[in-house]
Image (cartoon, grey):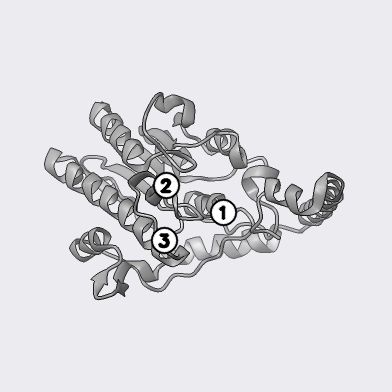
């Protein structure tokens, strides 16, 4: 049931059935939060302190601070990077970028009901999500150590960009709580091209290039792509390239986002920005 959206649940259960479902979720959340708040945190703090002492932390002070871009893809499985279909690369541009740089194969999905926001939470805080209880929706993140907060304290302009409504998954409030200076959501892109759920990946990445180019200080930009979202027919509906199966629609959509990432990467290279940038 964690993979359903609320409006679909209303259709399946009816309004009364959904009300019962929602009350059950609220009750479970309250019990779980109460359990977590009663935990003795001292053993965990002691463990982390020992790890820190044994790790041999280095004080890194580079001559100049590089820009940092965290590009978050939607619905892209690990197999897509080096996977082929009918003898052709599923993501030729991302494969080219990986071959020029570094990629990691030994990863696994640790997200739960928050899906995309669970992924954000893990990358930005180095903390695992809580099962069945998305941190963005249910917890105060003001005091959670985070990447944007640390970079902000070290002179970075910290920005998040997502071509959808900021209220969805409580993302706007959560991003501010995690330390972002600025955010761009659906209304901030004006009349930019829309595909599927919101602003197209092409338009979001073009705006990101403008923001990066205009920045006068080191910048941390978190870009969340959206066009390649289930049911994967959004691109085909716009281009007229609809296919017979969801798998084939997926590939059409995947190659669209792959092309946009390739263009974004090449634009950073051409402008010289990439030399002073860490792109993840």
Res 35 visible: yes
- Report crowding for label 1: few under 14, some 14 to 19, many 20 or more residues within 10 A (C-alpha): many
Say which element carries label 2. loop
Left or right: where does residue 38 sit relative to residue 208? right
In the rendered view, would you say 69 is above or below 176? below
Q: Which residue does the image show at 74% across and 49% down from the upper left?
A: 11
**Residue 112 image point, x, y percent:** 62, 60
Cα separation, mark 3 vs mark 2, equals: 11 Å
Say which element carries label 1. helix
**Tag shown at residue 118:** 1
Q: Which residue does the image show at 85% across and 51% down from the upper left?
A: 17
Label 1 vs 3, first from the N-terminus: 1
Res 56 visible: no
Cα separation, mark 2 vs mark 1, equals: 19 Å
Label 2 vs label 1, nearer the camera: 2
**Tag shown at residue 227:** 2
Q: Which residue does the image show at 24% across and 75% down from the upper left?
A: 87
Disc 1 to disc 3: CB gap under 8 Å: no
Label 2 vs 1, first from the N-terminus: 1
């Amino acid at each position: 049931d964690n993979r359903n959206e609320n409006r679909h649940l209303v259709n399946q259960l009816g309004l009364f059935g959904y009300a019962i479902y929602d009350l059950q979720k609220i009750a479970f959340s309250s019990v779980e939060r109460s359990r977590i708040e009663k935990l003795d945190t001292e053993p965990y703090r002691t463990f982390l302190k020992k790890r820190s002492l044994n790790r041999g932390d280095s004080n890194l002070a580079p001559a100049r601070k590089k820009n940092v871009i965290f590009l978050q893809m939607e619905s892209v499985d690990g197999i897509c990077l080096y996977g082929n279909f009918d003898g052709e690369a599923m993501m030729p541009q991302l494969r080219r970028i990986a071959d020029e740089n570094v990629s990691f194969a030994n990863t696994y999905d640790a997200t739960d009901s928050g899906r995309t926001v669970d992924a954000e939470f893990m990358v930005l805080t180095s903390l695992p999500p809580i099962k069945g209880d998305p941190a963005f929706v249910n917890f105060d993140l003001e005091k959670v150590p985070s990447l944007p907060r640390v970079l902000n304290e070290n002179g970075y302009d910290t920005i998040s960009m997502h071509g959808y409504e900021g209220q969805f998954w409580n993302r706007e409030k959560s991003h501010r709580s995690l330390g972002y200076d600025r955010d761009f959501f659906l209304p901030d892109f004006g009349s930019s091209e829309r595909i599927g759920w919101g602003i197209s990946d092409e338009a979001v990445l073009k705006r990101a290039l403008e923001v990066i180019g205009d920045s006068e200080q080191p910048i941390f930009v978190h870009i969340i792509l959206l066009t390649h979202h289930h049911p994967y027919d959004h691109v085909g509906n716009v281009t007229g390239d609809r296919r017979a199966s969801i798998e084939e629609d997926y590939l059409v959509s995947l190659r669209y986002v792959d092309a946009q990432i390739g263009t974004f990467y090449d634009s950073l290279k051409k402008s010289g920005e990439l030399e002073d940038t860490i792109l993840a």
